[in-house]
Image (tube, helix red, strand yellow):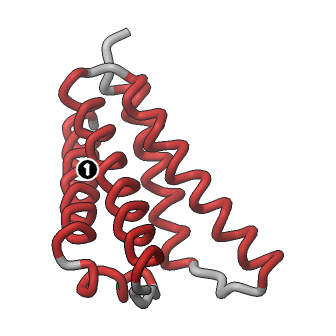
Amino acid sequence: MNRILSVLVLLSGVLFLFTGVQWLVVPADVAPQFGLTLDGGRGLSSQIGDMSGFFLTLGLCALLGLTLKQRVWYYPAILLLSLTALGRCLAWLVHDAAFAVDLIAPEVLISILYGFAARRLTDK
């Protein structure tokens, strides 16, 4: 069980890192995956900076938790993913945004995965 959990954390962490690097290198390729069109000027700077920072932080925290076996590294990733899912739900409820199940479900599932990893894959 722990081996499968480790592989899932590793794969998700690498995927998050890859997505963060894509935001830095080829934002036009990755933006449509999130239903975004790229802005210009300061808006583009915010999109690239915020999105790359978000995904690089997720990936680094997951991989640090996995390699250092310290549960504290999973908590920022859990918070980022959980608050993002909550924000998407509130955007739907309050601001008439689309209910993005395809984005919310992975955020919730990976938050749960990281919660299990924090309990099972770390030193006590």
* In the depicted structure, whether residue 46 falls above or below residue 17: below
Vertical arrangement, residue 2 with respect to residue 23, above or below: above
Q: Residue at x 49, y 46 (%)?
A: 112
Label 1's element? Answer: helix
Q: Position of residue 35 (x, y in %)?
A: 46, 87
**Which quadrant would residue 65 be assigned to in this image?**
top left
Q: Quadrant of residue 32?
A: bottom left
Q: With respect to residue 18, does 91 lie above or below?
A: below
The answer to whether residue 109 is left or right of residue 1 is right
Image quadrant where residue 42 sits: bottom left
Q: Name the foreground residue: 88 vs 120.
A: 88
Task: Check disc 1 and report the residue beneath it.
Answer: 13
Q: Residue at x 27, y 61 (%)?
A: 20
- Identified by mark 1, the residue type is Gly
Q: Nearer the viewer, residue 58 or 106?
A: 58
Residue 18 at what x, y percent from top left?
Answer: 19, 62
Give me the residue at 57% from left, 78% from top. Answer: 101
Side of 95 relative to 84 (left or right) = right
Q: Quadrant of the C terminus?
A: top left
The image quadrant where one finds the N terminus is top left
Coordinates of residue 13 in the picture (x, y in percent) = 25, 50
Residue sitting at x 36%, y 48%: 58
Q: Residues within 10 Å of mark 1 (few under 14, many from 20)?
A: many
